Image: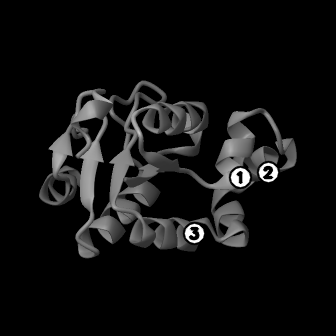
Amino acid sequence: MKITILGSVAFRKEQLDMKNKLKELGHVGIISSDMEELALGKNQELLDRIEKDHSKAKKEGGYIKWYYDSIVASDVVLVLNLNKNGQENYIGGNVLMEIGFAHVHDKKIFLFNPVPEYVSYTDEIKAMHDEIINGDLTKIT
């Protein structure tokens, strides 16, 4: 199964780890090549641009469109919602959009952890996701 892995750039190392774990389970985990480079400690220039002006880096890199296309070409998506800066199960605005892309294309949406309850868009996430796997990748079917 082809699985696009969604999550904050802060989770880049974990995304690469998930890609490898999914491969061990017989799936194809998909993250952008730039995200993979960043996870491997490469392309410091890109990381600097992201830290300086994230929105500009997203636009110049075409990442929103890249993830849209990847989601459409995938069978399902995995939202890697981990803890970020003291916020449990973090899902930011960009990932919310990506969940929406998956939803309107009838892709099954798996959350790695429970829905964050502290964001103003909790109801939207609850309305779109299919299953919370609580870290158990074998539940992706």
Q: Residue at x 72, y 41 (%)?
A: 38
Label 2: how many Cα within 10 Å (few below 14, some 14–19, many 20+): some
Residue named by callout 1: 34
Indicate which disc residue 102 carries. none
38, 2: nearer the viewer: 2
- Mark 2 vs mark 1: which is more N-terminal? 1
Residue 78 locus on image (x, y percent): 36, 47
Q: Secondary structure at mark 3?
A: helix
Looking at the picture, does residue 31 appear above or below residue 13?
below
Q: Decide if residue 120 is in sight here.
A: no
Judge depth for marks 2 and 3 and give the one in front: 3
What is the distance, in whole Å, between disc 2 and disc 1 at their CAs? 8 Å
Residue for badge 3: 66
**Could you tell me how far apart the alpha carbons at marks 2 and 3 are, in whole angstroms?**
16 Å
Write the residue at 35% across / 58% down: 96
Q: Are marks 2 and 1 in contact (CB under 8 Å)?
A: yes
Question: Looking at the image, is 27 positioned above or below residue 84?
Answer: below
Q: Identify whether 104 is placed above or below 140.
A: below
Residue beneath the point at 23% across and 70% down: 106
Query: Given the current orientation, which residue lies at the most extreme front position?
Result: 26
First along the sequence among labels 2 and 3 = 2
Q: Amino acid at mark 3?
A: Trp
Kind of residue sitting beneath label 1: Asp
118 on left or right of 65 = left
Residue for badge 2? 46
